[in-house]
């Protein structure tokens, strides 16, 4: 089975300083795959390179068999590769509804249908739809960022550290809705600091350290790996 997204020998640098070093991974249609690792491991850089936000200096990214590593970010979005950054990058002086409508710029004809879907997914946003995005709580802003990404009708959703800074209630609610999206067939690539959540949610995972893949395998196996438990779960 060919991969929906395939990354091969990817190299990404900042000012000639290597950050992602020869990374190869693949994500198949309908999968949820995690990338875990410490701060500074290169997770965000990897995601930005896949999404076309950053230009790799070596290797390749393929989507549905076609190379996309030379495309601009808006071109990858049009193809169905949607990146939700850890910073969320909302427009704080615009309403929830206006932020969502901006997310539909690549498929504006279906915006009413998509809007109904995301407001059903996160009912709290329906209640807040006229409220300025900058006045939302952190959890509500994360729901909005994910929903804005969904407005673009992604084939694969790249979520970068979605639980960072969120209260446990919002983390649980977010993963509950992500599980619903996965059940409906959405492919998800997830970078996450909360390793138990990431490995419980996904089928497969990659461990990224110092810009390189150090381990990979089935998420359930990595969750029980003594080295992973010691390094990321605080188990001696």
Image (cartoon, helix red, strand yellow):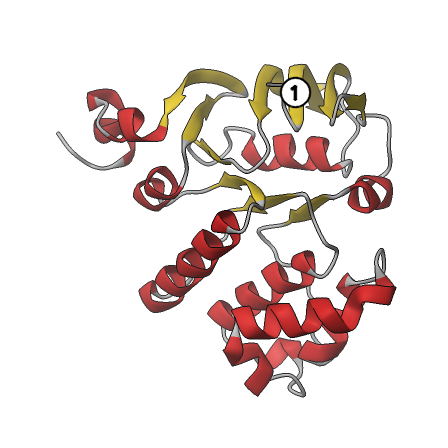
- Can you give x and y, in whole percent of width and height, for residue 70 in the image? 86, 26
Where on the picture, by quarter, is residue 130?
A: bottom right
Residue at image x 16%, y 33%? 235
In the displayed structure, 136 sits above or below 204; it is: below
Is 164 on the left-hand or right-hand side of 26? Answer: left
**Residue 108 location, x and y as percent?**
86, 64
Above/below status of 32 relative to 170: above
Quadrant (top left, top right, bottom left, bottom right) of the N terminus: top right
Asked whether residue 91 appears in the rendered view, the answer is no
SS at circle 1 = strand
**Residue 8 horizontal/vertical position (percent):** 66, 14
Q: Image point 70% across, 32% down: which residue?
A: 50
Q: Which residue is mark 1?
A: 7
Name the outermost residue toward the left. 236
Question: Closer to the camera, 163 or 76?
Answer: 76
- The answer to whether residue 224 shows anywhere in this view is yes
Position of residue 2 measured from the top left corner of the image (x, y, whole percent): 64, 19
- Where 140 sits versus 11, above or below? below
Residue at coordinates 41% horizontally, 38% vertically from top-left? 202
Q: Quadrant of the C terminus?
A: top left
Count of numbered circles in the view: 1
Q: Nearer the viewer, residue 7 or 123?
A: 123
Quadrant of residue 47 within the rendered picture? top right
Q: Is residue 65 above or below residue 119?
A: above
Q: Is residue 153 left or right of residue 139?
A: right
């Amino acid at each position: 089975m060919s991969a929906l997204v395939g990354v091969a020998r990817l190299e990404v640098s900042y000012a000639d300083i290597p950050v992602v070093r020869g990374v190869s991974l693949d994500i198949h249609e309908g999968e949820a795959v995690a990338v875990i690792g410490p701060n500074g491991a290169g997770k965000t850089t990897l995601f930005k390179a896949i999404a076309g936000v950053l230009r790799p200096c070596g290797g390749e990214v393929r989507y549905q068999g076609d190379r996309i590593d030379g495309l601009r970010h808006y071109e990858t979005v049009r193809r169905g590769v949607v990146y939700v950054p850890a910073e969320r990058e909302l427009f704080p002086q615009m309403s929830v509804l206006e932020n969502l409508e901006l997310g539909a710029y690549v498929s504006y004809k279906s915006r009413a249908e998509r809007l109904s879907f995301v407001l059903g997914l996160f009912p709290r946003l329906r209640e807040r739809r006229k409220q300025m995005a900058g006045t939302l709580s952190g959890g509500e802003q994360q729901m909005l960022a994910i929903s804005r990404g969904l407005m673009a009708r992604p084939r694969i959703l790249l979520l970068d550290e979605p639980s960072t800074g969120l209260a446990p209630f919002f983390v649980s609610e977010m993963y509950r809705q992500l599980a619903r999206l996965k059940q409906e067939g959405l492919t998800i690539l997830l970078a996450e600091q909360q390793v138990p959540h990431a490995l419980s949610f996904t089928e497969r995972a990659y461990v990224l350290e110092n810009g390189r893949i150090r381990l990979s395998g089935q998420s359930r196996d990595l969750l029980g790996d003594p080295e992973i438990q010691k390094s990321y779960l605080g188990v001696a």
